[in-house]
Amino acid sequence: MWGKIVGALLLCLSCATAIAEDAKPITVTPIMVTQATASGQPIVLPQGEIELTAATYNIAPGAVLPEHKHPYPRYAYVVAGTIAVANLETGKTVTYHAGDVIVEAVDQWHKGSNVGTDAVKLIVYDFAPKGAQNMVKK
């Protein structure tokens, strides 16, 4: 009986290998490569035990996020819409569109605004010490 089971498993494995070899190729396209935040700061991760938090944001057309800052690194992928981020310390505003990556400034006051006609959808990643908050409102 074990011989039949082993034979069946080997047959399944050989079929799986054949299917994998016939599969469509996988393409990886880098979206962004950077060593600096939106305001030119070097990217530095917190030391010690960190916690990754991933969240989705949906920002209605015309909505403005309050003035705030992030004491730790925050990254966002713009899934949809157009958002302008105004850095209140540098005076620089950068507009991001669907498909862009935002590398937020660390510990600098800024605010974001949906400047398009569609909702902004973001996937946001925070890297902070375990239990720490990564958004401070002004």
Image (spheres, rainbow, N blue to C red):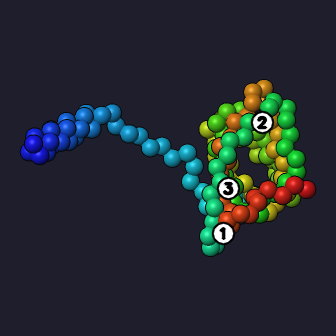
* Front position in the image: 41 or 123: 123
Q: Are marks 3 and 2 in contact (CB under 8 Å)?
A: no
Task: Identify whether 99 is placed above or below 118.
Answer: below
Q: Residue 135 at what x, y percent from top left?
A: 79, 56
Q: In percent of the image, x 66 and y 69: which residue is there?
A: 46
Q: Earlier in the sequence, mark 3 or mark 2?
A: 2
Task: Identify whether 10 is placed above or below 132.
Answer: above
State how far apart marks 3 and 1 are (Cα): 11 Å
Indicate the amino acid at tag 2. Ile
Q: Residues within 10 Å of mark 1 (few under 14, many from 20)?
A: some
Task: Give the total number of marks visible in the rendering.
Answer: 3
Secondary structure, mark 1, is loop
Q: Residue 121 at what x, y percent from top left?
A: 70, 36
Residue 23 lies in quadrant: top left
Secondary structure, mark 3, is strand
Indicate the amino acid at tag 1. Pro
Identify the residue under disc 2. 59
* Front position in the image: 32 or 80: 80
Specify the quadrant that holds the C terminus: bottom right
Q: Residue furthest right?
A: 138
Does residue 14 appear in the picture of this structure?
no
Q: Residue 27 at what x, y percent from top left?
A: 41, 40
Q: Earlier in the sequence, mark 2 or mark 1?
A: 1
Identify the residue under disc 3. 126
Residue 35 lies in quadrant: bottom right
Side (left or right) of 10 relative to 24 = left
Identify the residue under disc 1. 46
Q: In percent of the image, x 75 and y 30: which residue is there?
A: 119
Specify the quadrant that holds the N terminus: top left
